[in-house]
Image (cartoon, grey):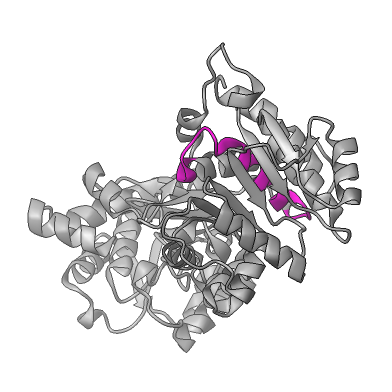
Amino acid sequence: MAALDRRAIDSLGIPGMVLMERASLVCADALERLAPGAPSLILAGPGNNGGDGSCIARIRRCRGHRATILTLGDPNSYPPDASANLEIARRAGCEIAPASPDRLRAELHQRPVVVDALFGIGLSGTLPREVVQLLDIVRREHDGTVLAVDVPSGVHSDTGSCDPGTLSATHTVAMGALKWCHVLGDGAERCGTVEVADIGLPRCWLDEAAAATIVDRRMAGTLVPQRSRNVHKGCSGTILLRAGSPKMPGAAVLAALGAVMTGTGLLSVDASEDVLSLVLRTVPECVAAHSGRQHDVVLIGPGRGTSDEAAAELESTVTEVRGPLVLDADALNLMAARGLVGSTEHWSAILTPHPAELARLLGVELADVLGDLPGAAMRAARMWNAVVVAKTAGAVIAAPDGPVYFVEPGSSKMASAGCGDVLAGIIAALRPHLPPLESAILGCWVHAAAGHAAALATGSLRVRAQEVARNVPSVLSELGPR
């Protein structure tokens, strides 16, 4: 975003002060809604985020509210625009003082709305010790509104990871566009309610610079396959499911249920006799697989185990199947542990790992993945030449050639066993009708929406995976005709 600001200044001639003014007006308007009439306490850092804070304080003061700015560092060394806004705020009647623990406590006794304008996206590394001390005082002694300018200080905008000293905001105003931290990881939790401020940058610039596209209902609706009236089950998508084991038979049931509820024409199950019997009893639309039947897509891995037999099956599937593949769970673990997939140049695969599986696929530590999930998903997509669905609270979807998408979480109640199996089934059912990337995008959105619907209908602390699957038809029906 800093690069876009500079581009607007250099290419369009928009003064930096104008960009600050537009950003600050949105923040000031938000404060009017959140805490009308309350005094404002602005914690202003030494960069342009602090300049925004000074501008917010001046607008609040001009609107008749008390506004105090506590500055970090030496104001004489501030960037020109930040320094100018601080001086304007002084002339407008704002109180300005160096940030110190004693002064901060005194201001907090006035029960102000606190504005975090310390660093924004400008922080690299960890929070300075004196800042951690100040933020800790706010955390312990203030229970009112905290508005963060662009990003709460200590949240890393590109990854969503957070410094331990980060102060959670109740409201964040994102400048120009959302960043990863607004939707992903601990950062999303720390941002509170997020709104985006239009600061006057061209929309085409923002689209070009976007790290990812956030999938919304409108976009999902454009992807829903439409069937002609003259169809039969053989042209409505056929799936071969290789899932389940004596220790995890339910994974096959849930993957099958996800596919059937999405609308697959025919689902054949290749599993041990006891697992097959359970699937056929529970999801009677399924049939037993036989060697002569051709399939549009193969889904392999959920609950399959990592035995030598499962490894051999995966190897034969990857080498013999020329059509689309969806690989989940144990198939991914086997890929990582045994290197079973050789050349992936010509395959058409969707991989659906959770963070631990993604770390195994990349040969890195789990902490490396959690620290930068978008980056990890993009690396895995290039490494394995596949569409990668990195499952977390929400999903990061990456393709080998670069596009990245984010599907927001459906409900925290979906953090339960089996929901990933249902997702794999949904994606597999869509794959005969859509390209790999679009199948993953729509599948993740439908899964999240179905989980949200299931969560609304239950008083439990979690939703069962079966409940998610059973809400898929209504979600697809609301999106559009199939």
Q: Is residue 6 magenta?
A: no
* Position of residue 441 in the picture relative to residue 278 (left or right): left
Residue 143 in the image: state x and y as whole percent: 63, 63
Residue 56 in the image: state x and y as whole percent: 34, 57
Asked whether 255 or 50 is in front, the reply is: 255
Residue 3 in the image: state x and y as whole percent: 22, 63
Looking at this rendering, what residue extends furthest in the front direction?
Answer: 292
Q: Which residues are magenta?
A: 415-438
Residue 283 vertical position relative to residue 83 in the rendered view, above or below: above
State the image quarter where residue 385 is shown.
Answer: bottom left
Residue 364 vertical position relative to residue 82 in the rendered view, above or below: below
Residue at the image point whose x is 48% and y is 68% from the top = 376
Residue at the image point whose x is 73% and y is 39% from the top = 268
Asked whether 200 or 279 is in front, the reply is: 279
Q: Main secondary structure of the magenta part?
A: helix
Asked whether 67 or 54 is in front, the reply is: 54
* Position of residue 25 in the picture relative to residue 249 (left or right): left
Number of marks drawn? 0
> Split into 4 quadrants, where in the image is the C terminus?
top right
Residue 194 in the image: state x and y as whole percent: 48, 50
Residue at the image point whose x is 63% and y is 18% from the top = 232
Q: Is residue 429 magenta?
A: yes
Asked whether 184 or 432 is in front, the reply is: 432
Q: Does the rendering let one see residue 192?
A: no
Q: Does the rendering let one see residue 481?
A: yes
* Position of residue 107 in the picture relative to residue 414 (left or right): left
